[in-house]
Image: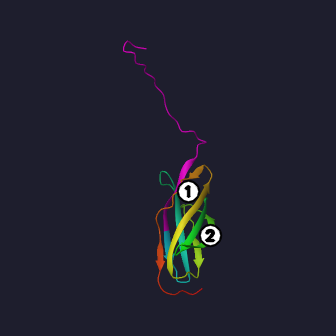
Amino acid sequence: MNEGGNITANFTLTADEDEEQLARVKNISYKNRILYLMITPTIVDASGHAIENALVSINVYLNDDLYYSGSGRTGSKGTVSLKLTGPSAGTYKTVIEDVEADGYLFDGITPNNSYTLIGKFFR
């Protein structure tokens, strides 16, 4: 202790390598292919880097009613595409129910998203 009563300490903080990082949904894109609707969520870490091989579970709502539930694994770009065949006209909204990846914990947040199909489509 010095005369002023202050103590000086030097230390370095390091991250625990076993500590889980947060996984988040960067965005959810929709592509209308007439006979099917492709829904593609992108999963990234807190730094925005793609998370490969994450298991992504989704619920898709059509006009606020559950329309589809499914899951798939992300590729090297952190994306997984889920195909809805014979989409009906209406407004689709996707909710990410879970993301499972080694060393990551899903932050539980689904970004705002929706896609509206107008007209009649074949099943």
Q: Is residue 77 left or right of residue 102?
A: left
Residue type pointed to by label 1? Ile
Residue 3 among magenta residues: yes
Q: Are marks 1 and 2 in contact (CB under 8 Å)?
A: no
Q: Residue lying farthest front?
A: 64
Density class for disc 1 (Cα within 10 Å; few <14, some 14-19, many ≥20) is many
Residue 111 among magenta residues: no
Q: Position of residue 13 (x, y in %)?
A: 50, 34
Name the residue that disc number 1 marks: 51
Q: Position of residue 11 (x, y in %)?
A: 48, 28
Helix, strand or loop: magenta stretch: loop
Q: Quadrant of the C terminus?
A: bottom right
Residue drawn at (51%, 58%) of the image:
109
Q: Quadrant of residue 66?
A: bottom right
Name the residue that disc number 2 marks: 69
Residue drawn at (51%, 87%) of the image:
120
Q: How is the image coloured?
A: rainbow
Residue situated in front as seen by the camera: 37 or 74:
37
- Element type where label 1 sits in the image: loop
Q: Is residue 10 above or below residue 49?
A: above
Residue type pointed to by label 2? Ser
Q: Position of residue 76 (x, y in %)?
A: 56, 60
Density class for disc 2 (Cα within 10 Å; few <14, some 14-19, many ≥20) is some
- Residue extent of the magenta highlight: 1-28
- Element type where label 2 sits in the image: strand
Q: Position of residue 64 (x, y in %)?
A: 53, 72
Label number found at residue 86 = none
Residue drawn at (51%, 82%) of the image:
89
Task: Measure the C-alpha gap from mark 1 to mark 2.
Answer: 21 Å
Q: Is residue 34 left or right of residue 7?
A: right
Q: Quadrant of residue 108?
A: bottom right
